């Protein structure tokens, strides 16, 4: 509840540095190399990436905790002349999401969750993405010796995801002063 209110406030004040309005090259590369299907955008914000994915021929469901972000995403999709299913939904529950999805995207959502939230997220992602489905995630990592709400490490990604997903590629990077990475994974057979 508090987390949702904090995101609503950030969207209301337009203090959302993660919502750049530009789809990253890692997503564009994936879309160029993949056949369209059903996609899930986790933490979709105002819909930038869901719109990009839809323009590449995919059917997209976008979920975000913020009602304000979802309203803006619907408006942005309407202005682009696209039909996209945007839902206010908690990524740790995905109560209204059934799947199966061929592809799931997360740009900066997973690393903001608590440990229990991350476990629930992975269980629900595994439930809705089909075996062989792709998962593209961008995440930031905890900075050594600094206090932060992000406690995720590179080792955590392997530990948390590898029972259910095969890591196909990993690209380390930086976001400002923070260590970050892009992972492309494939859902293992059930």
Image (cartoon, rainbow, N blue to C red):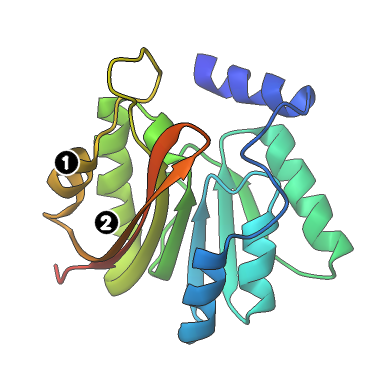
Numbered badge on residue 155: 1
Numbered badge on residue 16: none
The answer to whether residue 92 shows anywhere in this view is no
- Count of marks overlaid on the render: 2
Whether pointer 2 and pointer 1 mark residues with C-beta atoms closer than 8 Å, the reply is no
Question: For the point 56% across and 66% down, which residue is it?
Answer: 25
Q: Is residue 170 above or below residue 186?
A: above
Secondary structure found at label 1: helix
Task: Please rate how many residues cluster around mark 1, counting C-alpha atoms within 10 Å: few if below 14, some from 14 to 19, many from 20.
Answer: few
Single out the mark in the foreground, 2 or 1. Answer: 1
Q: Quadrant of residue 64?
A: top right
Q: Residue furthest front?
A: 177
The answer to whether residue 63 shows anywhere in this view is yes
Q: Nearer the viewer, residue 73 or 182?
A: 182
Question: For the point 34% across and 25% down, which residue is it?
Answer: 143
Numbered badge on residue 126: 2
Task: Please rate how many residues cluster around mark 2, counting C-alpha atoms within 10 Å: few if below 14, some from 14 to 19, many from 20.
Answer: some
Distance from Cα at disc 2 to Cα at disc 1: 20 Å
Question: For the point 43% across and 62% down, which residue is it?
Answer: 104
Q: Pick whichever of labels 2 and 1 is earlier in the sequence.
A: 2
Secondary structure found at label 2: helix
Q: In this image, 112 relative to 60: left or right?
A: left
Q: Is residue 126 above or below residue 64?
A: below
């Amino acid at each position: 509840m508090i987390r949702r209110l904090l995101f609503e406030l950030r969207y209301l004040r337009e203090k959302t540095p993660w919502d750049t309005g530009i789809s990253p090259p890692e997503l564009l590369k994936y879309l160029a190399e993949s056949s369209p299907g059903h996609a899930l955008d986790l933490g979709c914000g105002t819909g930038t990436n869901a719109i990009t994915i839809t323009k590449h021929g995919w059917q997209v469901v976008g979920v975000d905790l913020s009602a304000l972000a979802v309203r803006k995403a619907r408006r942005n999709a309407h202005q682009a002349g696209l039909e996209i299913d945007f839902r206010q939904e908690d990524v740790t529950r995905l109560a209204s999401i059934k799947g199966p999805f061929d592809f799931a995207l997360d740009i900066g959502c997973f690393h903001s969750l608590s440990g229990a939230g991350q476990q629930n997220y992975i269980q629900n992602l595994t439930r809705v993405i089909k075996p062989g489905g792709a998962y593209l995630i961008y995440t930031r990592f905890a900075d050594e010796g600094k206090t932060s709400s992000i406690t995720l490490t590179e080792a955590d990604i392997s530990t948390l995801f590898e029972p259910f997903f095969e890591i196909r590629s990993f690209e380390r990077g930086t976001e400002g002063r923070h260590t970050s990475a892009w992972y492309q994974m494939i859902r293992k057979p059930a």
